[in-house]
Amino acid sequence: MAGNFWQSSHHQQWILDKQDLFRDRQHDLAKLTEEEYQKVFNFFASIIQVLGEQLKLRQQVIATATVYFKRFYARNSLKCIDPLLLAPTCVFLASKVEEFGVISNSRLITTCQTVIKNKFSYAYGQQEFPYRTNHILECEFYLLENLDCCLIVYQPYRPLLLFVQDIHTQIQDDQILTYAWRIVNDSLRTDVSLLYPPYQIAISALHIACVMLGKENLKPWFAELNVDMDKIQEIVRTIINLYEMWKSYDEKKEIQGLLGKIPKPSPAPQR
């Protein structure tokens, strides 16, 4: 999917203003601190990632599912739909949009049950995955409506590969791409996909990777880029803040308490 980002619904409708994003979260931030809110979204990003890996999806599909998840809650409270239902619904929709192919309903539900039981029992204890196919299909319609059918998501991976190709004309180092790719994956656990164009996220990931690897000789390459370096620094700070949070955060100990605090949808689904 090449197309033109600047003419896309991603650019025209889904690059949000930070103040608007914060304002729309006020209902949830009455129950959770901003850091707790980010920790909850980290957790569900992990569920989407593990679910995608178990279903053998490409990273592009997983990334799109994660962006759908974040877009929905950018405009809605956590109490609108249980995130545990929305997460697999986003995976289900993204697999179709990214032309991976439709995941069979039974396979999706079975994988959800296995993943929650085996990988996330520290959060849900003995609770089984409570949703069935009809819940996923109903939730998909609601998700499509809230996304305003804007389903094409431009990810930082393509511009990242182009930038690394350009860097390779000056310096050959495969580690740069490996590090930057992981940083782009990590950026999905922040709000940057809602606030900045993908090419800026790609440059920010490269910047962090070069600092980690001590690539001082690439300073001239960055200096020649015709980009808003203030925006790049904002993205870099956001990702670094995520890494700082991870240093002191023990998800296995904290997440049950955090999940207990989030606003709950009503009524609960029937088995």
Image (cartoon, helix red, strand yellow):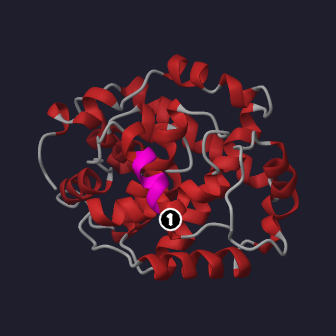
Residue 239 seen in this snapshot: yes
Q: For the point 23% across and 67% down, which residue is it?
A: 99
**Which residue carries the number 1 mark?**
134
| 213 falls in the magenta region | no
Q: Is residue 185 left or right of residue 6?
A: right
* Magenta stretch, residue numbers: 137-143
Quadrant location, the C terminus? bottom right
Residue 263 image-quadrant placement: top right
Q: Is residue 115 left or right of residue 64?
A: right
Q: For the point 84% across and 49% down, which residue is it?
A: 260
Query: How many numbered callouts?
Result: 1
Q: Nearer the viewer, residue 24 or 212?
A: 24
Q: Nearer the viewer, residue 258 or 200?
A: 258
Q: Position of residue 68 (x, y in %)?
A: 43, 48
Q: For the point 40% across and 49% down, which residue is it?
A: 141
Which three-letter amino acid code belongs to the residue tagged 1?
Answer: Asn
Assign a secondary structure to mark 1: helix
Q: Position of residue 12 (x, y in %)?
A: 26, 27
Q: For the point 54% across and 76% down, which residue is it?
A: 109
Residue 171 image-quadrant placement: bottom left
Vertical comparison of 164 with 267: above or below: below
| 142 falls in the magenta region | yes
